[in-house]
Amino acid sequence: MRFYLLTLGCPKNTVDSDGMRRLLLEAGHVPVNEEEDADVLIVNTCGFIDIAKEESIGALRNLADSKKPRQLLVAAGCLSQRYGWKLMKQIPGIDGVIGTRRWMEITTLVKRLSANERVTMVGDPPCSIGWPFGDVLRFAVQGASAYLKIADGCSAPCAFCAIPQIKGPARSRPKEAILKDVRQLTSKGIKEIILIAQDITSYGRDRGERDGLPTLIELILSEAPQLRWLRLMYAYPQHVTLRLIEAMASHRQVCHYLDIPLQHAHPNVLRRMNRPSDVGRVRSLISRLREAMPDISLRTSFIVGYPGETEEEFEALLDFVGEMAFDKVGVFTYSREEGTMAAELPGQIPEEVKEERYGTLMELQQRISLERNRLMIGRKLEVLIEGCGDGLSFGRSYRDAPEIDGLVIVEGEIRPGDMVEVKITGAMEYDLIGQSFSSSMMR
């Protein structure tokens, strides 16, 4: 059968989609780029916050309305895990549902759908103890970079988040499986591996390891000394240890970049979020990171308009952002998620207040981002080229993760996949401009 696979949401979904694609290919199914050419339409949905749910439901509705009589529509991923058969009831054109804990059974689902069954597969798989996903490959390649998932699920008790309901508790991949993927990726010439999970710093905790991530980093770099960049994504602030900082600082391949979602900066809000509320400890952590790696690029994210957030608490957040001067900041308005503790909290904030606070914080961060980027002018940065055209190339330095951060725009057309030295000559709020010293210009 021919299949069309649409992926929505975060890089973790991208990895799961790649796993489904590989399984379908191994079973003899054929991928197509146009939905009208497919026998099976698969949407890997996101169900994290309202705007993501709306996008996923919109995509499913559009495909349900336009699909041909012979075509089958499958809803996969987070939204499916969360709502299951209710989603099929809401959108009658959906023929099958498969969740985040069963996607490795996608070929079984397709086979059953071909036999005219309507199927919902959202529970835990039969083997749900330890790592339940078997030896299914857990990476997704994008150009010369690859996302590599090292764990699935989340055990953090954040009051606003539905991820533990969707993904289940945190479960770490076996080291041997991760290293096998690293060997395969580097043998194919991959230059950047991005370690991802809901919280990479919890790696190994489900198996009794208290500080498993630094050990994993050491093993990866020993296994693949030729790897150019190893990037770490999504670190829980309480779990960033001195040993992890040392591992990042002492290995040249580890990008001096860390994404630490902090969510807020007022102790009272953090307590209502059921998050670590010692803001002084966070300040100390940021100081230690910058002391160990003066060139580190720090990304974080904040929620504005959380239930009960006062003007005073919001002002404290603004003061903190101004003081810390993060390189990158993502801002989200609070989304009231069904089944979470925060959904029942008093003091729900009106949408117009959330939007106003969002705009205020983003305006502040844009000024900070521009100042941080201007500090790069005159410096030389190694840039991984991702595309070119019209006399320009674009890529990323160690300071930027794919899809969420900025770009380095370089004069001249350079082969995608090349890593070149670039002198930074200009700065914008999110992007940098530079000139390459490379001889790999395309003719």
Image (tube, rainbow, N blue to C red):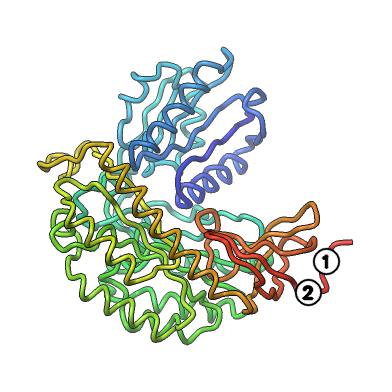
Q: As shown in the figure, which amino acid type bears the numbered disc 1?
A: Met
Alpha carbon distance from label 2 to label 1: 7 Å
The residue to which callout 2 is attached is: 438
Seen in the picture, residue 273 relative to 421 is either above or below; the reply is above
Specify whether 442 is left or right of 177: right
Q: Quadrant of residue 214?
A: bottom left
Seen in the picture, residue 371 relative to 363 is either above or below; the reply is below
Q: For label 2, count other residues whose C-alpha is less than 10 Å away and answer few (under 14), some (14-19) or many (20+).
A: few
Seen in the picture, residue 313 relative to 419 is either above or below; the reply is above
Q: Residue 185 location, x and y as percent?
A: 61, 64
Question: What residue is shown at x 15% (from left), y 45% (from top)?
Answer: 341
Question: What residue is shown at x 18% (from left), y 57% (from top)?
Answer: 313
Element under label 2?
loop
Element under label 1?
loop
Q: Nearer the viewer, residue 433 or 103?
A: 433
Question: What residue is shown at x 21% (from left), y 48% (from top)?
Answer: 306
The residue to which callout 1 is attached is: 441
Quarter of the image containing the N terminus? top right
Q: As shown in the figure, which amino acid type bears the numbered disc 2?
A: Ser
Specify whether 377 is left or right of 438: left
Looking at the image, do the residues carrying marks 2 and 1 touch, with CB atoms under 8 Å apart? yes
Q: Residue 426 location, x and y as percent?
A: 63, 68
